[in-house]
């Protein structure tokens, strides 16, 4: 446990210091996110802090692996792919790359991630390899993009990343996830905490695509690696990210039902609606963290004995969180009687 705490502490310290350094560089270069009618902030804020977060995760996770004498293996490949995604996404932050270029980069990263996992996807225990890989790739691509969609208020991606990292790390300690996931999970938790020093409301810096995209990829890697054995492990991996998955997926379905373009920027996610309804960014994050705490408990203690109950209960928890946040926003938009 001491070693885990050291990894978390190193990740937090490096991420915090690196983010401060990147913040100064971004300010001098005027790489700013300017408010518009779809923003949840009111002053121009530097974006691109994800570079510091990814650098911290990679440095600490690889360093811990080397010190432990464990093989770098697939995790090293995944971290390299995340760094590549961060570079491409930072270019997108600066120049707005085409959707085709972005999707191609995401697809190559997912393909590389599946190769790093020895060709085993999340459903390897139940489906033929071609179907398993295809379904996992689609889910992983969606997860990368929904992570980006959910990066719309201060602190929400950092807190979600920390929660998933805690969940996967705990599963590794319980023997429900590969032990090799413990170091990167601890590093991700630390890096998220270090970034939140600068990103908690009111944020002094945003992740930008250079953070939300590669972090979504890495969290997807941890979840797919956890899920591969099937049974309780698959249930636990499906439960942990449900707060983000439910909000992003239901919002997309609602927009498609109204004939809206899926690529069109908007502020219709439940967490954004809650902010519009008067809740602070911190209060919304606290609500999602409370839901995540319940999901972690389900993944750790219910999934190992009753996988289906864990899944149903997880959907209920995440759905309730979504409904609460949406209701806050809807109530604010209702005309006075």
Image (spheres, rainbow, N blue to C red):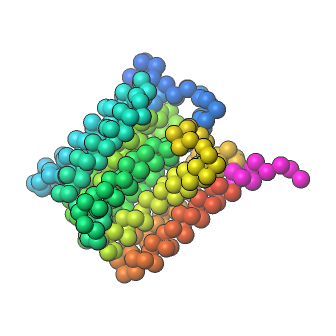
Q: Quadrant of residue 118?
A: bottom left
User: In this picture, is 14 found above or below 159?
Assistant: above
Residue at 48% from the left image edge and 39% from the top image edge: 199
- Does the magenta run of residues contain 330? yes
* Magenta region, main secondary structure: helix
Left or right: residue 83 compared with residue 209: left
Q: Quadrant of residue 168?
A: bottom left
Residue at the location (28% across, 68% down)?
A: 127
Residue 33's x, y, as percent?
A: 51, 28
State the image quarter where residue 83 is shown.
top left
Q: Quadrant of the N terminus?
A: bottom left
Q: Seen in the image, is 269 located left or right of residue 19?
A: right
> Which range of residues does the magenta coloring cover?
328-337
Q: Is residue 11 above or below residue 35?
A: below
Horizontally, residue 180 falls left or right of residue 227, namely: left
The one nearer the camera, 104 or 226, is 104
Q: Position of residue 148 (x, y in %)?
A: 45, 43
Look at 64% across and 49% down and name the residue there: 258
Q: Position of residue 269 (x, y in %)?
A: 59, 49
In the image: residue 163, left or right of residue 222: right
Along the viewing direction, whichever of 20 and 136 lies nearer the viewer: 136
């Amino acid at each position: 446990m001491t070693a885990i705490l050291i990894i978390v502490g190193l990740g937090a310290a490096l991420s915090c210091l690196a983010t401060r350094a990147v913040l100064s560089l971004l300010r001098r270069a005027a790489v700013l996110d300017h408010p518009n009618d779809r923003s949840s902030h009111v002053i121009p804020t530097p974006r691109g802090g994800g570079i510091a977060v990814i650098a911290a995760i990679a440095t600490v996770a690889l360093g811990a692996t080397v010190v432990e004498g464990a093989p770098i293996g697939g995790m090293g490949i995944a971290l390299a792919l995340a760094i590549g995604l961060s570079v491409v996404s930072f270019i997108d932050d600066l120049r707005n790359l085409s959707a085709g270029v972005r999707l191609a980069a995401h697809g190559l990263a997912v393909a590389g991630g599946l190769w790093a996992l020895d060709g085993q996807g999340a459903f390897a225990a139940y489906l033929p390899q071609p179907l398993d890989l295809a379904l996992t790739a689609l889910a992983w691509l969606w997860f990368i993009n929904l992570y980006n969609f959910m990066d719309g208020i201060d602190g929400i991606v950092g807190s979600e990343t920390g929660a998933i990292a805690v969940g996967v790390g705990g599963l590794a300690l319980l023997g429900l996830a590969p032990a090799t996931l413990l170091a990167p999970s601890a590093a991700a938790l630390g890096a998220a905490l270090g970034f939140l020093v600068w990103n908690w409301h009111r944020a002094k810096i945003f992740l930008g695509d250079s953070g939300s995209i590669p972090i979504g990829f890495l969290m997807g890697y941890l979840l797919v690696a956890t899920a591969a054995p099937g049974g309780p492990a698959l249930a636990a991996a499906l439960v942990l990210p449900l707060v983000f998955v439910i909000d992003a997926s239901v919002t997309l379905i609602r927009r498609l039902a109204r004939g809206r373009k899926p690529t069109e920027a908007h502020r219709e996610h439940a967490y954004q609606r809650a902010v519009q309804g008067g809740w602070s960014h911190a209060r919304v994050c606290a609500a999602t963290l409370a839901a995540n705490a319940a999901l972690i408990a389900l993944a750790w203690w219910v999934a190992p004995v009753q996988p289906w109950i864990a899944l149903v209960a997880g959907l209920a928890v995440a759905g309730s969180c979504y409904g609460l946040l949406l209701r806050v926003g809807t109530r604010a938009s209702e005309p006075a009687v």
